[in-house]
Image (cartoon, rainbow, N blue to C red):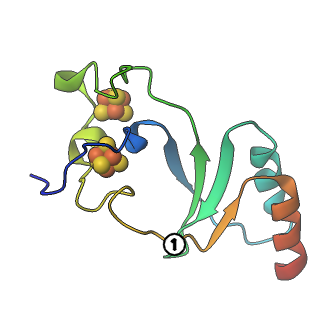
Amino acid sequence: MAEKSCEGCGAKCCKYIAIEIDAPETKEDMENIRWYVLHKNVNVYVDCEGVWHLEFLTPCENLGEDNKCKIYDKRPIICREYDADTCLHHNEYEEEYTFTNIEEVDKYIKEHF
Ligand code: SF4
Ligand code: SF4
């Protein structure tokens, strides 16, 4: 049971999904990253451990206007296991890279490939 409270957070963890992706190894691999970030509310980031993620900034359809889960008893395991003590609201997680647009990706390509 988490010691930290969700009070006042605004349910940040229910407003995006992030999926781990293979780290690009070639300039050609970067083409998909360029494509991803051309889409609205889609970002790519590299976490502090060097793991690449595709991120969709989109709220869960079961999040109520009061920022409470409408399917609390049936919520997925990932939601049950998410821990407020280690969550993004209560901790500073520095990302190694964040790409929100194609210009940022192209700058990275220029510097790394
Ligand atoms: S677990 Fe963290 S991010 Fe999620 S609602 Fe609670 S305080 Fe906010
Ligand atoms: S199912 Fe509930 S806890 Fe899980 S993301 Fe949706 S609103 Fe949040």
Tell me the residue at 51%/75% (across/down). 48
Per the image, label 1 sits on a secondary structure element best described as loop
Considering every residue shown, the one lying at the far left of the view is 1
Q: Position of residue 86 (x, y in %)?
A: 28, 62
Q: Please report the residue visible at 36 percent of the width from the left and 66 percent of the height from the top.
A: 91
Residue toward you, 53 or 23 = 53
Looking at the image, how many numbered discs can be counted on the residues?
1
**What percent of the width, then of the height, locates residue 94?**
51, 72
Rendered image quadrant of residue 56: top right
**Dot 1, how many residues are within 10 Å of its Cα: few (below 14), some (14-19), or many (20+)?**
few
The answer to which of 60 and 19 lies nearer the viewer is 60
In the rendered view, tell whether residue 111 sits above or below residue 42: below
Q: How far across and how far down the image is residue 60, in percent?
A: 44, 27
Q: Is residue 42 above or below residue 108?
A: above
Kindly indicate the quadrant of the structure image that contains residue 75: top left
Residue that appears at 25% across and 20% down: 71
Q: Is the C terminus in the top left, top right, bottom left or bottom right quadrant?
A: bottom right
- Mark 1 lies on residue: 94
Q: Is mark 1 within 8 Å of ligand 1?
A: no
**Residue 28 in view of the camera:** no
- Provide residue 108's location: percent of width, then percent of height: 81, 72
Q: Is residue 105 visible to us here?
A: yes
Which quadrant of the frame does ligand 2 lie within?
top left
In the visual, does 58 lie left or right of 27?
A: left
Dot 1 amino acid type: Glu
